[in-house]
Amino acid sequence: MAFLSWRDQYRVGVEHIDQEHRFLFDLINEFHNEYRGGADRRAMEQVFNRLVQYSEEHFRHEEETMLESEYPLHAEHCALHEALYMALFRLSEELAAGSLRIDMDTHRFLRASLVEHILKHDLAFSDYLAQRTKAMLASKQDSPPA
C-alpha cells in the first residue's frame, strides 16, 4: 500500500495541476519506499532533491494559472508556496549535511504539508474557478443575441 494515495477529493479540476499533484505524491511515495527499503542516505537525498526541484516547478505553474485566471488570492497563495518551498529546501540542506534524522515524522510532515495545502488552499482556487465559470456562463445567457 502506498504511503500517500491519490483521491478524487484532491482534484483541483485543472488537468495539468492535478497531474503535477499526482507526481508530487509519487515522489513522496518514492522517498518513503527508499526509506522503508533501507536505501542509503545518498539515494534518499537524490529523491528528496527531485521533490524539492519539482515542487518549485509545480508552484510556478500553479501560480501562472492563478494569475491567468485573475485569482484574487494569488499573492497570498504565492506566499504559502514560498514558505512550503523553503521548508522543503531546508530539509534537503539538512539531509545533505547529514543533520536530518529521517524518521516517520519527516514522512508525515511531507504528507501533511502536501495534502493540507491541496485541501485547504488549492481547492479554494478550484472553487474560485468553478464560480468564475458559472458567472461567465450566466453572463453569456443574459446577453442579448447579436
Image (spheres, rainbow, N blue to C red):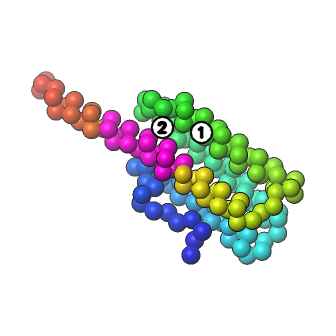
The quadrant in which the N terminus is found is bottom right
Q: Are marks 1 and 2 in contact (CB under 8 Å)?
A: no
Badge number at residue 28: none
For the residue marked with disc 2, what is the amino acid? Answer: Thr
Residue 117 horizontal/vertical position (percent): 54, 48
Q: Which residues are magenta?
A: 117-132
Residue 128 sits in which quadrant? top left
The quadrant in which the C terminus is found is top left
Secondary structure of the residue carrying numbered label 2: helix
Secondary structure of the residue carrying numbered label 1: helix
Residue 17 horizontal/vertical position (percent): 49, 48
Task: Assess disc 2: are there few (<14), some (14-19) or many (≥20) residues with their C-alpha within 10 Å of its C-alpha.
Answer: some
Residue named by callout 1: 80
**In terms of sequence position, does the residue under pointer 1 or pointer 2 come before the other?**
2
In the depicted view, which residue is nearer to us: 114 or 129? 114
Number of dots carrying numbers: 2
**78 displayed left or right of 32:** left
For the residue marked with disc 1, what is the amino acid? Answer: Leu
Residue 57 horizontal/vertical position (percent): 62, 44
User: Is residue 145 visible in this depiction of the protein?
Assistant: yes
Residue in view at x 49 percent, y 47 percent: 120
Task: Assess disc 1: are there few (<14), some (14-19) or many (≥20) residues with their C-alpha within 10 Å of its C-alpha.
Answer: some
Residue in view at x 65 percent, y 44 percent: 84
